[in-house]
Amino acid sequence: MSSGKFKNPFHKPHIPPPSPLPPPTQDLIQEPQPPTPALGPLPPTVLTAHILPYLSPTTLLPLSLLNKTWLSIARNDSLWHRLCVLHGVRVGPWTDGLQWWEVFRIFWKRRGNWKRGVYGVKVVEVVGIGDSVNCFKYDADVLLVGTRRHRLHLHHFPWTSVPHLSLSGHTHPIMCLATTQQHLLTGDATGTMMLWNIFTGGLLAVVKAHEGAVVGVGFVSGVVVSAGVNGQVKTWKIQTRVETETIIREHQKGLRKISKKLQKRHVEVFEKEIVEFVHANHIVAHVGDCFCVWVGEWVVTGGLDWCVKTWMPTTLAHHRTFRGHTDSVTCVAVHANWVMSGSLDKSIRQWDLQTGACLHTFLGHTKWVKTLDVSEEWLVSGGWDECVLVWNWKEGKLGHRIDVQKGPVVALQFDEEKIVVGCRGEDVQNALIVVDFGEDKHENKNQATS
């Protein structure tokens, strides 16, 4: 055996206790803090005013499904009204009787349908059989239609084949129209331009504006702009003067005598307001025909010479010429600082309004482009290939191809709810085709071809 003392393997050595800490100095002594109160539920007014406005709409809508309390909080009317204003939701007859959260929900679904290309199609007859739609313009309340048989119809929502008001005056096909809050301006195939009271339908003024068809008209800065197919662009002032008219009415026997001097006749004096166009300026905008004009902050024209040109709206001083198309320019539109133009060369070009640079060329149509419209997010075009193309113009990409297949597309306009299209198909010439991205209003839904 080995010598020595036996060591227990489980034995722990003795560890001396730590030395006591020195007494705290005066700087380290802290004042006693009151206990933190428990955070109770926030009042609904605090949630609605300070928290919920910062949540996304996709977060707010599911909150209403939690319970009745959250339902009342998440559907606060002022909250959703604020969101509608921030997102620029257009209101009109379709919003009558709806709460603001319902209005926004419909808007949000439409927005998603635009991105996914989900839509329904319906055909709305707006003029009589045998006639055809040449031009139209609509807003939330009123649809105005000009036809080949020189009819001018005003429809209220919802649109039907029976117009609310028919205006008579033109004797040739109506080619273009424009509106203000009070007036309607129209131009026809013989160069005649007319001004109307949009509320009463009364004809206010008539002028022979151009030799040949009027291809476009518009209001800007207190003047009227018109463009003729002969290549001229003109500006007009609208002047009003008062004429006095005297009517003498002979009295018949048996009527009570008015006075000795007016015993046999009665004189009536009327004041009549005369409205007339006064020519201000004119230019020859293009070498050859002018096919289109857009009137706004600038006057933009396109023509046979393959060029897009911009002009000062009141003086018609030349601003810039955009070159790049390889055939006639047939349609133009403007959004903010960008000009969009369509052409017989089947392309659409995006131009910088200030520099004149071509920023992008959109290729997708298989025949020439007749009409287009543009918004903050989308560019919509139509042409002789019987298709409507929806472009994400900021990304330069084709979003959807809508095969209308109802004849060449001659006119279109769109908003966040729908695209309205006028076609030359034999069975739809008297109608407008509505491509609806709204609620499930139609049984058949179509997935647009991307």
Image: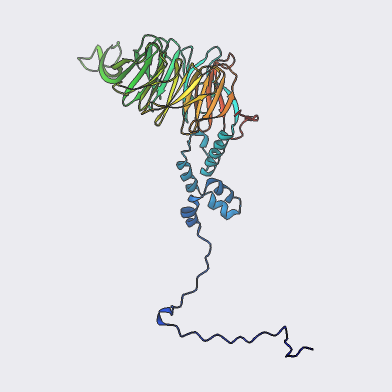
Q: Is residue 144 visible?
A: no
Q: Which residue is drawn at 52% across and 34% down?
A: 94
Image quarter where the N terminus lies is: bottom right
Query: Furthest residue to the front?
Result: 2
Query: Furthest residue to the right?
Result: 1
Q: Can residue 424 be seen in this view?
A: yes
Task: Indicate the position of residue 313 as horizontal and vertical percent values.
Answer: 32, 24
Task: Indicate the position of residue 410 as horizontal and vertical percent values.
Answer: 51, 18
- The colour scheme applied to this rendered structure is rainbow
Q: Residue at x 40, y 82 (%)?
A: 26
Between 394 and 43, the residue placed more toward the observer is 394
Between 160 and 61, the residue placed more toward the observer is 61
In the rendered image, the vertical position of residue 146 relative to residue 440, given as above or below: above
Quadrant of res 247: top left
Task: Indicate the position of residue 176 as horizontal and vertical percent values.
Answer: 43, 18
Image quarter where the C terminus lies is: top right
In the rendered image, the vertical position of residue 296 relative to residue 210, given as above or below: below
Left or right: residue 191 versus residue 12 is left
Task: Indicate the position of residue 436 as horizontal and vertical percent values.
Answer: 57, 30
Q: Could you tell me how many numbered marks the image carries?
A: 0
